[in-house]
Amino acid sequence: MRQDHRLSRVLHVLIHLDRHRPHATSDEIAMMLRTNPVVVRRTLGGLKKSGLVSSEKGHGGGWQLARDLADITLRDIYNALGEPPLFAIGNADEQPRCLVEQAVNDAIDDTLDLARTLMMDRFASITLADIAADFDHRLKDYPEEARRFGHIRDDDAVKEDRQEGSKAG
């Protein structure tokens, strides 16, 4: 079974929209994700229906966040994507006559239901703000990258260097 990468790709896009640019066109997002703009419009259209993003047509338009990162959970996005399958395993026969296969199905179904519940609870507890904060923390180890994206201005870097120097001395 093929993996569905839409959740991770959409998370990537939404963090970029918050951290690096206020809006982006379907073409720009498609270039970032190495996909077709039609796929971007279809995918983000589901998020728009859920009130997570908005779009404007015309010059200066594009996709933008409709809510604050702290108000969007992974569960919100997962639901907006149509709740793609979480697992590639399942029962060989949904209505078996064999008692052994019925027992196997029950064991698998119970386990998958529990795992699904745990994942949905975890998805509901993680916001995009949590992921963005992790990104910000990781970015501190890459000052050149941070400058390139405007997270650290040159005057901020000078202040940090002075603070580091005063701690060492």
Image (tube, rainbow, N blue to C red):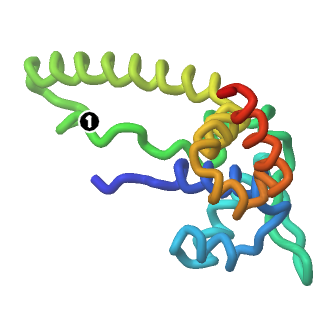
Tell me the quadrant of the picture where the C terminus can be found.
top right
| Image coordinates for residue 50, horizontal then vertical, percent | 76, 47
Write the residue at 72% across / 59% down: 147
Q: Identify the image quadrant of residue 23.
A: bottom right
Q: Residue furthest bottom?
A: 59
Give left or right: position of 67 versus 136: right
Q: Position of residue 130 (x, y in %)?
A: 67, 31
The image position of residue 140, as x and y in percent, is: 64, 42
Q: Quadrant of residue 40 in the image?
A: bottom right
Tag 1 secondary structure: loop
What residue is rendered at 53% in x and 49% in y? Answer: 8
- Which of 52/130 is in front? 130
Crowd around label 1: few <14 · some 14–19 · many ≥20 (10 Å)? few
Residue 18, placed above or below residue 62: above
The answer to which of 107 and 144 lies nearer the viewer is 144
**Location of mark 1 (residue):** 90
Q: Position of residue 2 (x, y in %)?
A: 32, 56
Q: Is residue 45 left or right of residue 93?
A: right
Q: Viewed as shown, does residue 96 lie left or right of 124?
A: left
Looking at the picture, does residue 80 appear above or below residue 30?
A: above
